[in-house]
Image (spheres, rainbow, N blue to C red):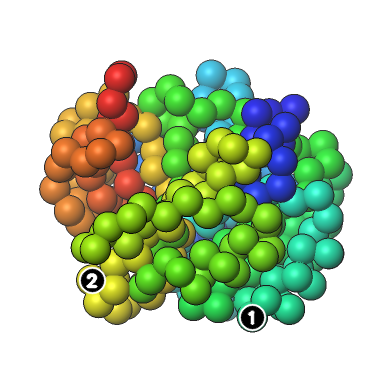
């Protein structure tokens, strides 16, 4: 069992990417992060799990040919009962778009969105407990919701998952940290009109790298895009990038590495 699974409901436990070209996407992330791949549940089509040092860190699936959807990394939140949580999502003003359904013997899942439209997954673990490694380069190390403002949406996530929501008291910075059992697990960042109009509110996955500047150059060399140049932030050195299919994520060299 992973640390995420032990830490209780609401903890981000997995990130998954649905794409149109799974083979080319595998090649991109293998070159960027050094991932290897093994087959995963095939209920929703071809799907592989990414491994780093033999331990599972993320998933990549193939969209059906007739589904002309934008690609995006999806953050999954651990739950004890996917059906019960899905019903709570609906009761609190959110939407359940897919499921709940079984992913073979791995677990039970659903794809949901909060009242502002930000998409996230819920995961009831059975055989598969989620990300087995976090911290080394190539692993997901943080998840953040980028939204218009945090107060109202924070109430939604607190009601559904029981988070302790700790806002930053600031006149010009709308930010809150989500805690499970006293431990920070994710964050909410209200950016108002600065939110990209073509994306709307969305969850962002941060992947650790050894060198943010070098990783940004590699993304471009591999056919991806650097959306925001490397910069220093409170978490470390950050760079916002997109893979060749347009899925957006953040690379971070955390302080202390």
Of 25 and 247, the residue lying toward us: 247
**Label 1's element?**
loop
Q: Which mark is residue 194?
A: 2
Residue 160 location, x and y as percent? 68, 63
Of 216 and 3, the residue lying toward us: 3
Specify which label sits upstream in the sequence, 1 or 2: 1
Q: Which mark is residue 176?
A: none
Residue shown at 49% from the left, 77% from the top: 116
Judge left or right: residue 23 versus residue 170: right
Q: CA distance from mark 1 to mark 2?
A: 24 Å
Residue shown at 61% from the left, 53% from the top: 163
Residue 255 location, x and y as percent? 28, 26
Whether tag 1 and tag 2 are in contact, CB under 8 A, the answer is no
Residue 34 location, x and y as percent? 41, 27
Would residue 30 be seen by someone viewing this image from the given angle? no
Residue 90 location, x and y as percent? 72, 77
Read off the residue under disc 1: 93
- Which quarter shows the C terminus? top left
Q: Quadrant of residue 108?
A: bottom right
User: Circle 1: is it few (<14), some (14-19), or many (20+) Cα within 10 Å?
Assistant: few
Q: Quadrant of residue 133?
A: top right
Residue shown at 67% from the left, 76% from the top: 92
Of 34 and 100, the residue lying toward us: 100
Judge left or right: residue 40 versus residue 140: right
Would residue 151 be seen by someone viewing this image from the given angle? yes
- Which quarter shows the N terminus? top right
The answer to whether 104 is drawn above or below residue 112 in the figure is: above
Residue shown at 73% from the left, 78% from the top: 91
**Label 2's element?**
helix
The answer to whether 98 is drawn above or below residue 136 in the figure is: below
Number of disc labels: 2
User: Circle 2: is it few (<14), some (14-19), or many (20+) Cα within 10 Å?
Assistant: few
């Amino acid at each position: 069992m992973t640390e995420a699974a032990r830490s209780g409901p609401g903890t981000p436990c997995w990130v998954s990417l649905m794409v149109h070209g799974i083979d080319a996407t595998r090649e991109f992330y293998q070159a960027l992060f050094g991932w290897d791949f093994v087959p995963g549940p095939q209920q929703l089509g071809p799907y592989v799990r990414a491994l780093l040092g033999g331990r599972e860190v993320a998933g990549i699936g193939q969209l059906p040919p007739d589904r002309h959807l934008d690609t995006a990394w999806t953050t999954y939140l651990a739950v004890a009962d996917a059906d019960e949580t899905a019903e709570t999502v609906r009761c609190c003003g959110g939407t359940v778009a897919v499921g709940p359904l079984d992913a073979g013997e791995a677990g039970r899942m659903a794809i949901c969105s909060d009242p502002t439209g930000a998409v996230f997954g819920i995961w009831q673990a059975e055989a598969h407990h989620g990300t087995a490694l976090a911290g080394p380069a190539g692993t997901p190390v943080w998840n953040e919701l980028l939204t218009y403002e945090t107060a109202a949406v924070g109430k939604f996530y607190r009601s559904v998952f029981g988070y302790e929501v700790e806002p930053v008291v600031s006149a010009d910075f709308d930010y809150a940290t989500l805690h499970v059992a006293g431990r920070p697990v994710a964050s909410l960042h209200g950016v108002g009109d600065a939110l990209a109009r073509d994306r709307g509110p969305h969850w962002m996955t941060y992947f650790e790298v050894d060198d943010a500047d070098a990783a940004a150059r590699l993304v471009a060399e591999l056919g991806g895009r650097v959306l925001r140049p490397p910069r220093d932030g409170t978490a470390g050195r950050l760079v916002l990038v997109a893979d060749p299919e347009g899925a957006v994520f953040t690379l971070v060299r955390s302080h202390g590495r």
